[in-house]
Image (cartoon, rainbow, N blue to C red):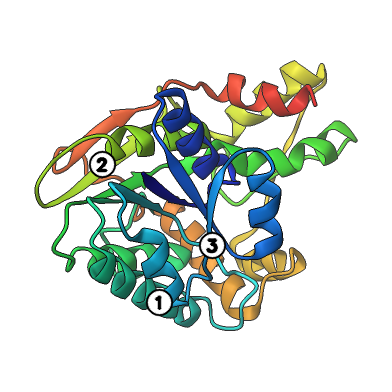
C-alpha cells in the first residue's frame, strides 16, 4: 500500500494512475470527508488528514511501503512560509512516527538555495527537514511546469498577448509536464535505496516564452504576441491574481531568480532525468478542450 498526497491533482493523479496501472494498491490522502466519499464511490481507498494534523497524518502513513508528498503553494496566505513550515513539521513528525518504507516528494529547481528564490524557499526548507528523517527519501526537483501557461489559453484565444514574467521572451528555461513528474514519482516509490536522493527532472527540450507563443499560435491559427511584465510591476501583477502581499513578494523574487540565472539545476551533482512530454503536446491537450 502507498499513500499519496495530492492524488486528485495533475501530478498526484498521475502517481495514482501509474501505480494503478502497475496493479499496486494506494490510498489518496485528502483533506475532508466529502472528498473522500467522492473518491471512494470510484473505488479508491482514502484517508482523511489535514496537512497540519499529526495524528491523522500518522494514521494515513502507517503500514505503507511509501508515501508521496506535495504541499500547496499557499500564496493567498498572509504568511506562506510560516504556514508551510507548520505543515512541514507536522508531515515530518508523522512520517517519523509512521515509518513508511520510503518518502518521495515534490521539490523544485533551485531548491538548493536558502535565499533569493522566493516561493521556492519553502521547498528548500522541505528538503532540509526531510533530509533529517532516518528513512530513504527522494526529492524530485522539477523544472518550470508547462501547465503554468494553461490559464492563459482562453485570454490568448480572445486576442490578449501571452503575458510573461520570464524576461527576455527568448530566454530558454527547462520545463516539465506535470504528468511526467507523476510518472517519476510512482517509479521512485517502487524502487529501493538507502539514504537521501535528489533527482533533477526536466522535459526533452528547453523552451522560451516565445516558443510557447509560437505553439499557441499554431494551434489557435493566429499570431500570438508576448507581453512582458516589467520587473517593477511583478508584485502588483501577482496581487491582481489574488495573492497576498507576502505571496506576491515571494513570486516576484522567484521570477527575478529565474531571470538572473540564480534558479537553475546544479547539473552533474545529482541524478538527472528527462520526461517524455514536449511542450506542444502538453498544451495541445488543453486547447482541444
Characterize the local packing of mark 3: few (<14), some (14-19) or many (20 or more) Cα atoms within 10 angstroms.
Answer: few
Q: Position of residue 14 (x, y in %)?
A: 51, 35
Q: Quadrant of residue 206?
A: top left
Q: Is residue 11 left or right of residue 78?
A: left
Whether residue 222 can be seen here: yes
Asked whether the viewer can see residue 229, the reply is no
**Which of the marked residues, 1 or 2, is nearer the chain's N terminus?**
1
Are circles 1 and 3 on residues that touch, CB within 8 Å? no
Lateral position of residue 241 relative to residue 65, left or right: right
Closer to us: 2 or 209: 2
Which residue in the protein does label 2 denote?
199
124 on left or right of 145: left
Point 74% across, 22% down: residue: 217
Residue at image coords 63%, 55%: 36
| Residue underneath mark 1 | 54
235 shown above or below 276:
below
Category of crowding for the residue at label 2, using alpha-carbon neighbours closer than 10 angstroms: few (below 14), some (14–19), many (at least 20): many
Residue where numbered disc 3 is placed: 72
Instruction: Name the residue located 51 percent from the left edge and 31 percent from the top edge.
Output: 17
Amino acid at each position: 500500500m502507498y499513500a499519496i498526497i495530492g492524488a486528485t491533482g495533475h501530478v498526484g493523479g498521475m502517481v495514482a494512475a501509474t501505480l494503478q496501472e502497475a496493479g499496486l494498491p494506494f490510498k489518496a490522502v485528502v483533506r475532508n470527508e466529502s472528498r473522500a466519499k467522492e473518491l471512494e464511490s470510484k473505488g479508491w481507498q482514502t484517508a482523511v488528514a489535514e496537512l497540519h494534523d499529526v495524528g491523522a497524518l500518522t494514521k494515513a502513513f502507517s503500514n505503507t511501503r511509501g508515501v508521496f508528498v506535495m504541499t500547496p503553494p499557499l500564496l493567498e496566505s498572509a504568511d506562506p512560509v510560516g504556514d508551510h513550515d507548520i505543515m512541514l513539521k507536522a508531515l515530518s513528525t508523522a512520517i517519523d512516527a509512521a515509518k513508511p518504507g520510503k518518502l518521495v516528494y515534490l521539490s523544485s529547481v533551485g531548491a538548493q538555495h536558502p535565499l533569493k528564490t522566493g516561493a521556492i524557499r519553502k521547498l528548500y526548507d522541505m528538503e532540509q527537514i526531510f533530509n533529517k528523517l532516518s528513512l530513504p527519501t527522494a526529492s524530485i526537483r522539477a523544472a518550470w511546469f508547462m501547465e503554468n501557461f494553461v490559464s492563459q489559453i482562453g485570454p490568448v484565444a480572445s486576442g490578449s498577448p501571452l503575458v510573461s514574467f520570464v524576461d527576455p521572451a527568448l530566454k530558454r528555461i527547462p520545463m516539465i509536464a506535470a504528468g511526467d513528474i507523476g510518472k517519476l514519482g510512482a517509479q521512485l516509490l517502487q524502487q529501493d535505496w538507502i539514504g537521501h536522493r535528489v533527482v533533477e527532472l526536466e522535459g526533452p527540450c528547453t523552451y522560451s516564452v516565445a516558443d510557447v507563443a509560437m505553439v499557441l499560435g499554431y494551434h489557435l491559427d493566429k499570431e500570438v504576441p508576448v507581453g512582458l511584465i516589467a520587473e517593477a510591476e511583478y508584485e502588483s501583477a501577482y496581487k491582481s491574481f489574488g495573492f497576498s502581499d507576502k505571496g506576491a513578494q515571494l513570486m516576484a523574487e522567484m521570477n527575478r531568480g529565474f531571470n538572473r540565472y540564480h534558479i537553475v539545476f546544479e547539473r552533474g551533482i545529482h541524478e538527472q532525468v528527462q520526461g517524455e512530454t514536449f511542450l506542444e503536446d502538453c498544451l495541445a491537450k488543453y486547447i482541444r478542450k
